[in-house]
Amino acid sequence: MSAAPSGTAGATRTCPHCRETILESASVCPACRHKLRFSEPGAAAAVPASVPLRVEGSFRNPDSGAWEYSMVLTIRNERGEEIARKLVGVGAMQPNEQRSFTLSVEMQAAAAGGKRTRPY
């Protein structure tokens, strides 16, 4: 989670719908996809986010017994130091069941005038 003060690049808040920690600048929650703020009439449209990373994959349990899985996401900085680690989900798969996963990173420019800070 970011330690950036309110109004700076990387500042966070809690989504009022799902209670996830999200960027303060978000107009749509990336977790629950609820709208958080509406554009003023005549205001410039927000620049769409780029998606520099998107990985999709799936796996099937080929075994005759149940298997359990844990999905863990780790974020590291340029020095390899861990800055966030989240257990995203857990579950079990019966024989011949399949699960699909998608990981995407969405990026957009910070608001004009916002200070650039490091969140660690």
Image: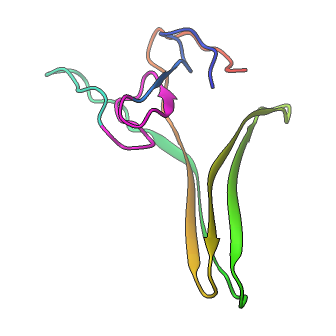
Give the left or right position of residue 44, taking residue 42 as reference: right
The residue lying toward the viewer, choosing from 108 and 14, is 14
In the rendered image, residue 41 lying in the magenta stretch gets the answer no
Give the left or right position of residue 104, taking residue 34 as reference: right
User: In the rendered image of this protein, does residue 68 appear above or below residue 104?
Assistant: below
Q: x%, y% of residue 16?
A: 37, 28
- Tell me the residue at 53%/12% (across/down): 8
Question: Where, quadrant-wise, is the C terminus in this rendering?
Answer: top right
The residue lying toward the viewer, choosing from 34 and 53, is 34
- Tell me the residue at 15%/21% (across/down): 42
The residue lying toward the viewer, choosing from 18 and 49, is 18
Q: Residue furthest left?
A: 41
Give the left or right position of residue 1, taking residue 45 as reference: right
Q: Which residues are magenta?
A: 16-34
- Tell me the residue at 51%/46% (across/down): 51
Q: x%, y% of residue 9?
A: 54, 17
Give the left or right position of residue 117, taking residue 102 as reference: right
| Number of numbered callouts drawn | 0
User: In the rendered image of this protein, does residue 18 appear above or below residue 6?
Assistant: below
The residue lying toward the viewer, choosing from 59 and 113, is 59
Q: Give the main secondary structure of the magenta stretch.
A: loop
Q: x%, y% of residue 7?
A: 47, 10
- Tell me the residue at 21%/21% (across/down): 43
Identify the image quadrant of residue 82.
top right
What scheme was used to colour the molecule? rainbow
Question: Where, quadrant-wise, is the N terminus in this rendering?
Answer: top right
Q: x%, y% of residue 26?
A: 41, 28
